[in-house]
Amino acid sequence: MNNPDKNEYVVVDTISTDLATLLIGEQEKEWVVEVDLLPEGSREGDWLKLDDEGNLIPAPEKNGQRKKNIRDKLDWLRQNR
């Protein structure tokens, strides 16, 4: 798989000892990278993007939205027991 375009979002699918599988775009194309290329503290499910220099960086705007969606679902479940 080729690298994603600059400023394209990717999500961390899996992390093993030395490799991570990232999913690119709506088609969720796989991109396997060395774990050392991930930002420190990256976890499965985290959103990242490729900066103008080709480095993977955190995408807090996407991670924040994911957390809000989870909170909303949990609130809904609590209210509709």
Image (cartoon, helix red, strand yellow):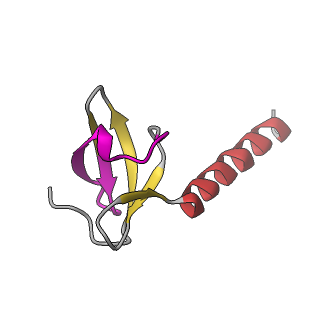
Q: Which residue is rendered at x = 23% and y = 50% of the image?
A: 30
Residue 74 image-quadrant placement: top right
Viewport quadrant of the N terminus? bottom left
Q: Which residue is rendered at x = 22% and y = 45% of the image?
A: 32
User: Seen from this angle, which residue lies furthest right?
Assistant: 79
Task: Judge from the rendering whether residue 1 lies leftward or rightward of residue 41; answer left or right.
Answer: left
Q: Front-most of 78 and 6?
A: 6
On screen, residue 41 above or below 51: above
Q: Which residue is rendered at x = 26% and y = 65% of the image?
A: 4
User: Seen from this angle, which residue lies furthest top?
Assistant: 17
On screen, residue 26 above or below 76: below
Residue 33 at x, y percent in the picture: 23, 45
Viewport quadrant of the C terminus? top right
Residue 22 at x, y percent in the picture: 31, 48
Residue 73 at x, y percent in the picture: 70, 45
On screen, residue 51 above or below 30: below
Task: Judge from the rendering whether residue 21 lies leftward or rightward of residue 38; answer left or right.
Answer: left
In the image, the segment drawn in magenta is 22-42
Residue 52 image-quadrant placement: bottom left
Is 73 part of what is drawn in magenta? no
Is 37 part of what is drawn in magenta? yes
Residue 65 at x, y percent in the picture: 62, 58
Task: Judge from the rendering whether residue 56 lies leftward or rightward of residue 77; answer left or right.
Answer: left
Q: Which residue is rendered at x = 15% and y = 61% of the image?
A: 2
The number of numbered discs placed on residues in the rendered structure image is 0
User: Seen from this angle, which residue lies furthest left?
Assistant: 1
